[in-house]
Amino acid sequence: MNGRPAPVTVIGLGLMGSALAGALLDRGHPTTVWNRTPRKAKPLADRGARVAATPQDAVAASGLVLACVLDYDALRTVLDPVAEAGGLAGKSLVNLTSGAPEQAVELAAWAASHGADYLDGGIMTTPPGVGDPRMMFLYSGSEAVFETHRPALAALGDPLFLGAEPGLASLYDSALLGLMWATFTGWLHGTALVTSDGTTATDFTRVALRWLNGAVSGFLTTYAPQVDAGHHPGDDATIDVQIAAIDHLIHAAHARGIDNSLPHLLKSTMERASAAGHGSDSYASVIEVLRDGAT
Ligand code: FVH
């Protein structure tokens, strides 16, 4: 390393790949790009990117190759010919394409068989957030790739290394998206409830964010060690108390004609926990019925 930003290749110039390449250009990285549909490279070429004619040329241009295409099948379509020609040997391949953990493990083995060092990534933002150091980029796989190329990865967002198991970044990505969708749906259900009585979504959200950032995040911090210990003392609020409380939500939503699928799902899950003997335990004990997916 000579202190100058390292050359990087970006394969895939959809919404996300274009944002990645743009962030690298902003930080002064000599950036080579390739996309199946060449016209998408034009805005990046105008900003100083070198446009490769083929995936082979793109990979040859840099030691670090970032890939962000639709899915793993598309990625293999692009990279198989490069690998067969020996073009991946000695390269650091960072794959930011979304996929399942098992696909990441398989791709890491495939990359190794072609002489490439592999780091898998999960992007925890949308394209406008790329380049913002508050946004998390999750990585797992080769720590050597992570450490060697940390400055380039930091151009994209805050890089977090989760461990050497290649599937970890995808696993966290899926878990965090599940958390996001559950939160979105709970927030929208609450919004439907209060807006039916004349409150605006904006006013409700101001209060909801105080609830999430203060009390709810505190509950998570309390419950995480309970889950780790497998011991969930109901010394704050028990499952049985919460089963009674959710009936008020169901009643209020029903009275306003609002869909109650989510509260019914939550109530039935709590009831399963109670039936399994956790009625006097904390909400963290719901983990036991979630883990035992067959019940
Ligand atoms: N957009 C987002 O907010 C999310 C954030 C989290 C991570 N995802 C994942 O990023 C991958 C790419 O997503 P994207 O938003 O950039 O998607 P598109 O704009 O649709 O671009 C798709 C690119 O993939 C290329 N491509 C598709 N099929 C093939 C193929 N068979 N061979 C070669 N390239 C292919 C496509 O090329 P083209 O259509 O422009 O020719 C684009 O470059 C994705 O895994 C998200 O889950 C984004």
Image (cartoon, rainbow, N blue to C red):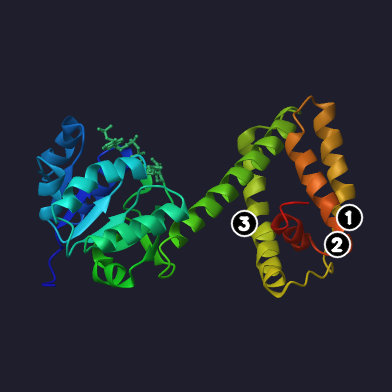
Nearer the viewer's eye, disc 3 or disc 1? 1
Question: Is 3 displayed left or right of 93 in the figure?
Answer: left
Q: Which residue is mark 2?
A: 278
Left or right: 273 in relation to 45: right
Question: Do tag 2 and tag 3 residues touch (Cβ < 8 Å)?
Answer: no
**Measured along the vertical axis of the image, is residue 66 above or below residue 144?**
above
Q: Amino acid at mark 2?
A: His
Marked residue nearer the N-terminal end (3 or 1): 3
Residue of label 1:
275
Q: Residue at x 82, y 70 (%)?
A: 233
Expressed as whole percent of the image width and height from the top left, the position of residue 126 reads: 40, 44
Q: Earlier along the polypeptide chain: callout 2 or callout 3?
A: 3
- Amino acid on which disc 3 is placed: Asn
Give percent across and percent down for residue 134.
41, 58
Graded by Cα atoms within 10 Å as few (under 14), some (14 to 19) or many (20 or more), the crowding at tag 3 reads few
Q: State the CA–CA distance, disc 1 to disc 2.
A: 7 Å
Q: Which image quadrant: the N terminus?
A: bottom left
The residue sitting at the bottom extreme is: 229
- Residue placed at 34% from the left, 55% from the top? 107
Q: Secondary structure at mark 3?
A: helix
**Front residue of 221 and 160:** 160
Amino acid type assigned to the residue bearing label 1 in the image: Ala
Query: Can you tell which mark lies on residue 213?
Result: 3
Give the label, 2 or 3, closer to the camera: 2
Q: Which secondary structure lies at badge 1?
A: helix
Distance of mark 2 from mark 3, alpha carbons? 27 Å
Quarter of image, ligand 1: top left
**How many residues crowd mark 2 within 10 Å: few (<14), some (14–19), many (20+)?**
many
